[in-house]
Amino acid sequence: MNLQEHYNQLYKTAKGAILDEKYAIDSHLKKESDSRFGITLLIRPSDAVKSEIQLLLYDLRKAEPEQYFYPDSDIHITVMSIISCSEDFTLNQISPSDYIEIICKSLVEVDSIKIQFKGVTASPSAIMIQGFPTDETLNNLRNKLRENFKNSGLQQSIDSRYTISAAHATVMRFQDKLQDPKKLIQISEKYRDYDFGAFEVKNLELVYNDWYQRKSNTRVLGDFGLR
């Protein structure tokens, strides 16, 4: 899959939906608590990249102050959603050490992962930073994880919602009616090709998380350093 084409297509569809006011508002965001939990293997971008993202968030916040913006602590790239978030899942259903073992096994041949954050894309309910892995390492790791988890007999729901292949980071979600859809698209266009920087992934985290990866609800189950 050509990632740039994938992001372009996403953006084109979302832009149309936003300008036609056919975007989606996430009604869960304003609720006090979210009882949808799951398990995710993720990457956190470097501080340098996060400070570049703040420039975009500053502009977005000025135009649409009522929307939901991810704090630095929650910005992430999903490597693999191992158990998708749902109200039916709780941590006591599994043994985290079994999952850690499979991830360690999958990481044996992984030396380094480097990701370039360049430009923004969107969905009908969110604004995202476009991530581009510089080689096939991330894809190979995902395939190894799929294979090892499917052969393990452990509870998992990998690829049940969609097959993950991108490396984006969601930074804003719509929780309210947009004040000015045109202005939102103008800001998105301004950052459409903006270079947020590249970073080498130092570690991966296995977390028990809610739908939005809020730090207050996240529990780190495993931390995997890369060579």
Image (spheres, rainbow, N blue to C red):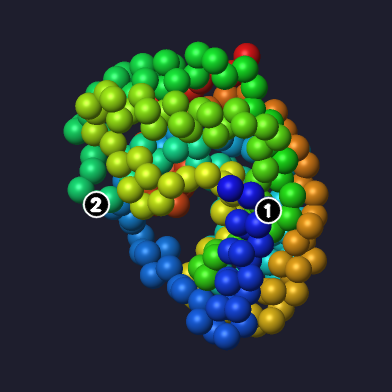
Label 2 environment density (alpha carbons within 10 Å; few <14, some 14–19, many ≥20)? few
Mark 1 residue type: Gln
The residue that disc 2 covers is 87
Q: Is residue 134 above or below residue 101?
A: below
Q: Is residue 67 left or right of residue 37?
A: right
Task: Find residue 152 and report its horizontal and vertical position in percent.
Answer: 27, 23
Q: Is residue 19 above or below residue 155?
A: below
Mark 2 residue type: Glu
**Pointer 1 or 2: first along the chain:** 1
Which disc is residue 4 wearing?
Answer: 1
Label 1 environment density (alpha carbons within 10 Å; few <14, some 14–19, many ≥20)? some
Q: Is residue 4 above or below residue 100?
A: below
Q: CA distance from mark 1 to mark 2?
A: 34 Å
Residue placed furthest toward the front: 1
In depth, the one of 101 and 136 nearer the eye is 136
Q: Is residue 198 left or right of residue 157?
A: right
Q: Is residue 109 above or below residue 209?
A: above
Q: Say which element carries label 1.
A: helix
Which quadrant of the rendered structure holds the C terminus? top right
Q: Is residue 70 left or right of residue 151?
A: right
Residue found at x 63% / y 70%: 12
Residue found at x 52% / y 70%: 124
Q: Say which element carries label 2.
A: loop
In depth, the one of 180 and 99 nearer the eye is 99
Q: Which quadrant of the view contains residue 103?
A: top left
Task: Find residue 35 and report its horizontal and vertical position in percent.
Answer: 28, 52
In depth, the one of 181 and 138 nearer the eye is 138
Task: Find residue 96 and report its horizontal and vertical position in percent.
Answer: 30, 24
Which disc is residue 146 wearing?
Answer: none
In depth, the one of 11 and 64 nearer the eye is 11
Task: Find residue 180 and report its horizontal and vertical position in percent.
Answer: 65, 82
Residue 203 visible, this orientation:
yes
